[in-house]
Image (spheres, grey):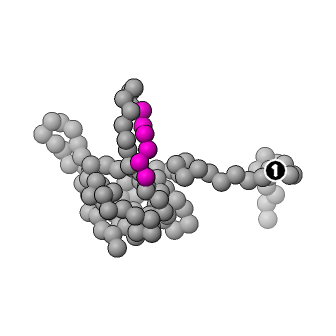
Amino acid sequence: MNEPDDNTIPPAGFTRLEAPRDSFPSWRFDDHPVLDGTVIEARTIELDREGEIRDVRVAVVEVGLLQYTLWEAYGLKSLFNVMRPGMKIWIHSKGLKPLRNGRTMREFDIYHD
């Protein structure tokens, strides 16, 4: 067994702090098109976008032993409208759909229990 690096062991007497709920890594549909997990928490946060304060809905989703932040996108609005803790969700990102204005929107297949 390899010995750990000196900097990976906290000093004696230190207390471990749990990470705040909003510090989980974001789920990246570009890297993993299917999200299959359980909602731990859903809430609205205030986000400052270029000086404009906006309410944005986020959820903490447990996938296996890890937890991720899921940000509301237009295509996920119907899910966020009914989301509750303990809900099992399965989301498949079908990729980006071009819009008439030259922008794109991510399309999803969404299922929940």
Percent position of residue 80, x then y: 33, 57
Q: Which residue lies furthest to the top in this view?
A: 51
Looking at the figure, which quarter contains the N terminus?
A: bottom right
Magenta span of residues? 43-48
Write the residue at 55% across / 48% down.
Answer: 23
Percent position of residue 69, x then y: 46, 53
Kind of residue at badge 1 = Phe
Q: Is residue 85 visible?
A: yes
Write the residue at 37% across / 67% down.
Answer: 89
Percent position of residue 38, x then y: 45, 67
Q: In which quarter of the image is residue 29?
A: bottom left
Q: Residue furthest right?
A: 12
Question: What residue did someone put label 1 on?
Answer: 14
Give whichever of 11, 78 is nearer the camera.
78
Q: In this view, does 5 lie to the left or right of 68?
A: right
Write the residue at 12% across / 39% down.
Answer: 100
Q: In this view, does 23 lie to the left or right of 42?
A: right
Q: In this view, does 85 lie above or below 42?
A: below
Looking at the figure, which quarter contains the C terminus?
A: bottom left
Q: Predominant secondary structure in magenta?
A: strand
